[in-house]
Image (tube, rainbow, N blue to C red):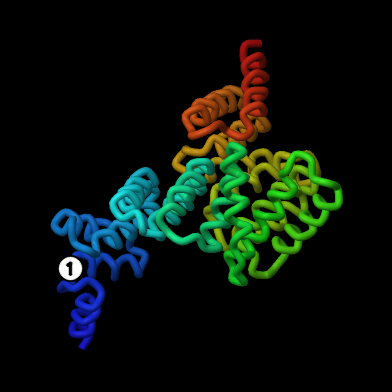
């Protein structure tokens, strides 16, 4: 019966008989055996590259590669799908999320912008577009477009929580918001971050506000909560590291270094921001040589990104300070 059901499902969906390699890969995928699943996905793609199910296989293959820490390979697979099948919402969405994971937020914004030429906008796309544009310090026209897209979307689901938070952060981020507008937006963002079902992106946005305001204990509590739903997310780890570099009763530079190192490893050393925090951590533990090496690599990496690294000036000051200190 299972075999007959499988045959019927494949025929209804793809108009073909099942591809054994992908059936086996999918079973391994569901069990979390990603290395084994990858081999079967790849084997099937080598023999059935033009099969109508090949795009789904590539998307699942990319997830296996992501879980195995091969983020370049995963992005390459997703980019191939979005190029060959431009109406694939899932390929664009996963690629943008992968780019955000790696600290490449402007690339993510451009990925979503390309997607919206080919697929209908929805709350998840709109939220990710605005969040990535805000995070990257995108050019004004791109940020304005992301804002416009967000304002045309209404929804009551979880994606809407992200969208509401991004809108509130956008108001706070404007150059000259009135005090009333700023405080209203801040209150809204705080409420959304405190909600029981708050998406981790919302918690990240409010934690950044709290750190900037010097409310470190509150930020740390929120970030630890975010870890429960996204334990390996690099930005959460690096923000948590940042809180342990602030003076106060919980200052712990060694722990900050551990957190920042994990954040960098999880991005496969692709994020200038995470490397910047790691360089700061090394500076705080007194290892100025390592701090300078990592800060310089962060600057080099930032120069290769689409656009510029948002905190370039702060990074430059750190490098200048470390360089003069090292020479002395």
| Structural crowding at the residue carrying mark 1, measured as other residues with C-alpha within 10 Å and reported as few (<14), some (14–19) or many (≥20) | some
- Would residue 96 appear left or right of 229 to someone viewing this image? left
* Quadrant, the C terminus: top right
Residue 163: give x, y in percent of width and height. 62, 59
Q: How many marks?
A: 1
Q: Nearer the viewer, residue 218 or 183?
A: 183
Residue at figure coordinates x 65%, y 26% from the top left: 313
Q: Compared with residue 216, is residue 300 higher up or lower down, i.e. above or below?
A: above
Q: Nearer the viewer, residue 144 or 202?
A: 144
| SS under mark 1 | loop
Residue 228: give x, y in percent of width and height. 59, 62
Residue at figure coordinates x 20%, y 77% from the top left: 11
Residue at mark 1: 19
Residue 248: give x, y in percent of width and height. 80, 42
Task: Farthest residue to the top: give it.
Answer: 328
Residue 285, quarter of the rendered image:
top right
Instruction: Tell me if I can see residue 176 in this picture.
Output: yes
Q: Nearer the viewer, residue 147 or 244?
A: 147
- Would residue 46 appear left or right of 244 to someone viewing this image? left
Q: Compared with residue 260, is residue 180 higher up or lower down, i.e. above or below?
A: below
Residue 9, quarter of the rendered image:
bottom left
Residue 205: give x, y in percent of width and height. 67, 51
Residue at figure coordinates x 56%, y 47% from the top left: 132
Q: Compared with residue 239, is residue 64 higher up or lower down, i.e. above or below?
A: below
Instruction: Tell me if I can see residue 137 in this picture.
Output: no
* Quadrant, the N terminus: bottom left
Q: Nearer the viewer, residue 159 or 323?
A: 159
């Amino acid at each position: 019966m299972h075999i007959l059901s499988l045959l019927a499902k494949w025929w209804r969906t793809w108009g073909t008989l099942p591809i054994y390699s992908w059936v086996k890969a999918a079973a391994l995928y569901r069990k979390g055996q990603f290395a084994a699943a990858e081999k079967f996905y790849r084997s099937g793609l080598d023999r059935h590259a033009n099969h109508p199910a090949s795009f789904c296989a590539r998307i699942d293959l990319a997830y296996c590669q992501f879980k195995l820490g091969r983020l370049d390979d995963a992005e390459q697979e997703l980019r191939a799908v979005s190029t060959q099948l431009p109406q694939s919402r899932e390929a664009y969405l996963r690629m943008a999320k992968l780019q955000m994971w790696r600290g490449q937020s402007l690339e993510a914004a451009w990925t979503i912008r390309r997607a919206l030429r080919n697929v209908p906008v929805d709350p998840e796309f709109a939220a990710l577009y605005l969040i990535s544009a805000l995070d990257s310090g995108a050019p004004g026209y791109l940020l304005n477009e992301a804002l416009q897209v967000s304002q045309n979307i209404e929804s009551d689901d979880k994606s809407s929580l992200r969208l509401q938070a991004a809108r509130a952060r956008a108001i706070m981020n404007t150059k000259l918001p009135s005090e009333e507008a700023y405080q209203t937006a801040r209150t809204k963002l705080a409420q959304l971050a405190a909600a029981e079902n708050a998406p981790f992106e919302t918690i990240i946005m409010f934690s950044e506000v709290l750190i900037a305001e010097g409310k470190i204990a509150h930020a740390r509590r929120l970030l630890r909560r975010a870890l429960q739903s996204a334990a390996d997310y690099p930005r959460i780890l690096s923000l948590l590291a940042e809180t342990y570099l602030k003076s106060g009763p919980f200052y712990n530079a060694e722990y900050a270094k551990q957190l920042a190192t994990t954040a960098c490893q999880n991005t496969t050393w692709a994020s200038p921001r995470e490397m910047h925090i790691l360089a700061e951590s090394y500076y705080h533990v007194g290892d100025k040589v390592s701090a300078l090496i990592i800060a310089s690599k962060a600057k080099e990496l930032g120069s290769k990104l689409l656009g510029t690294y948002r905190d370039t000036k702060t990074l430059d000051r750190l490098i200048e300070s470390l360089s003069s200190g090292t020479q002395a």
